[in-house]
């Protein structure tokens, strides 16, 4: 399916500096799982300083105060099901007109009855995590046996209740070759969206191996290949938007007889071979690929911790203010760090001069985790901007 290069990425229809598109609220750190990749140090009990019910409702009022189009609110954790007041919070948010979504852990607290309660409270979308196509891989990742089978059951319950189901999968060097089989599993579960998280080496995830820039590039191109089988989004890999534009340009060039310009690596060929039967099956239903949207950390996206700290993303360790002390809208619109993230032309290194920086900007979390500079170049991107070869001088290389 051909896409015009200038339409390969969706643009926000409002100023990302005025209102976010997505707000993630970490309602609690309490969680019964011990996931190996988690950015957070989950605990068995709620932190005594986490936002209480009244503070949570005040936060939801603040978010609704941005006006239409209202931000999407994702309640996550830890495990949001660990909060007894969660139905009340969801119901209140929905009454304000907010689109409420949940990202719970799959534990014994997740039952068909619980899911029915939240459906009636106003939740329309749920995301579940699945990091491997086999129980031994996923259960090993999550630190608890039986979670893979429980997730498969939970996905069916979500479908039966009419939820829009998103599956989140974290990709590391140890699990990347699971992706073809994982794709089949995700499609088989009837998910509406597959969100592939590119590991940020922070929290417990610092003990795992992230993909190299070349490996990430291969995965992004493979995800583009399969995006007509299931809607795909990437987390902490905004250069998927650059790939979407490049691939649209390639298709346009191929239509005029020009040769392909992208050279793929061995990992891409391995992943592609793993789904060759799907890609070559003319009888398999195809969908119009979901266009990625130009939202990035602090630029259309914000994360609020269980204690009220506001961050550009959940993987960044330094907060920009606290909603207990300063209204969230004021923090989002005026905090100097958040404002700086909306000016990718001022980023350091190659991200600052990249011709794709307005639609990409690189993963700010990867930049900080690896280099200590949140405005630095994304080390997981292998692309070399045209301006690098023009502006680099001996002793002044742009990296």
Image: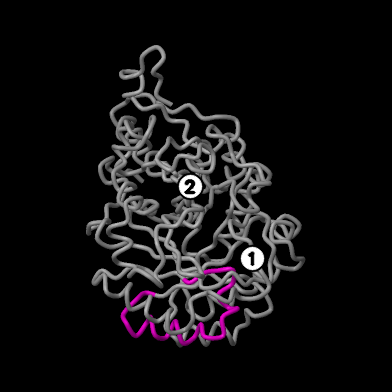
Question: Along the line of sight, which residue is nearer the eye, 70 or 123?
Answer: 70
For the record, the magenta segment spans 75-99
**Residue drawn at x 34%, y 53% as measured from the top left:** 338
* Label 1 SS: loop
Could you tell me which residue is drawn at 24 percent across and 72 percent down?
67
The answer to whether residue 78 is magenta is: yes
- Residue 309 vertical position relative to residue 6 in the rendered view, above or below: below
Q: Measured from the top left, where is residue 165 in percent x and y?
A: 50, 69
N-term-proximal mark, 2 vs 1:
1
The residue labelled by disc 2 is 365
Q: Is residue 347 magenta?
A: no
Seen in the image, is 202 located left or right of residue 324?
A: right
When asked about the image quadrant of residue 63, the answer is bottom left
Residue 102 percent coordinates (x, y):
49, 73
Residue 363, placed above or below residue 327: above
Callout 2: 10 Å neighbours few (<14), some, many (20+)? Answer: many
Quadrant of the rendering where the C terminus is positioned: top left
Labelled disc at residue 42: 1
């Amino acid at each position: 399916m051909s896409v015009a290069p200038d339409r390969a990425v969706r643009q926000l229809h409002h100023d990302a500096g005025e209102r976010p598109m997505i707000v993630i609220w970490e309602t609690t750190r309490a969680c019964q799982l011990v996931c190996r990749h988690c950015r957070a140090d989950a605990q068995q009990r709620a932190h005594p300083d986490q936002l209480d019910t009244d503070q949570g409702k005040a936060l939801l009022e603040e978010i609704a105060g941005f006006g239409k189009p209202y931000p999407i609110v994702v309640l996550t954790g830890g495990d949001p099901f660990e909060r007894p007041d969660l139905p009340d919070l969801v119901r209140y948010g929905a009454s304000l007109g907010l689109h409420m979504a949940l990202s719970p852990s799959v534990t014994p607290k997740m039952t068909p009855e619980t899911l029915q309660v939240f459906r009636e409270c106003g939740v329309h979308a749920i995301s579940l995590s699945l990091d491997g196509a086999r129980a031994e891989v996923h259960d090993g990742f999550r630190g608890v046996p039986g979670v893979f089978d429980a997730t498969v059951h939970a996905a069916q319950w979500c479908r039966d209740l009419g939820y829009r189901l998103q599956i989140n999968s974290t990709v590391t060097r140890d699990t990347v070759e699971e992706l073809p089989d994982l794709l089949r599993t995700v499609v088989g579960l009837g998910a509406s969206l597959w969100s592939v998280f590119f590991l940020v080496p922070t929290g417990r995830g610092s003990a795992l191996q992230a993909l190299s820039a070349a490996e990430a590039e291969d995965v992004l191109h493979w995800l583009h290949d399969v995006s007509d089988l299931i809607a795909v989004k990437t987390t902490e890999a905004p250069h998927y938007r650059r790939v979407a534009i490049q691939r649209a340009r390639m298709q346009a060039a191929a239509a005029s007889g020009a040769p392909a310009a992208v050279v793929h690596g061995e990992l891409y060929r391995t992943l592609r071979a793993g789904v060759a039967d799907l890609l070559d099956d003319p009888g398999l239903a195809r969908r119009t690929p979901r266009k990625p949207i130009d939202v990035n950390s602090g630029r259309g996206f914000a994360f609020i911790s269980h204690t009220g700290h506001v961050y550009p993303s959940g993987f960044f360790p330094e907060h920009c203010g606290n909603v207990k002390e300063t209204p969230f809208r004021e923090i989002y619109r005026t905090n100097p760090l958040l404002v700086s993230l909306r000016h990718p032309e001022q980023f350091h290194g190659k991200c600052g001069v990249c011709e794709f920086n307005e639609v990409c900007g690189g993963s700010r979390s990867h930049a900080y985790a690896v280099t200590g500079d949140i405005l630095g170049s994304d080390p997981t991107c292998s692309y070399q901007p045209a301006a690098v070869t023009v502006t680099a001088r001996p002793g002044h290389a742009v990296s």
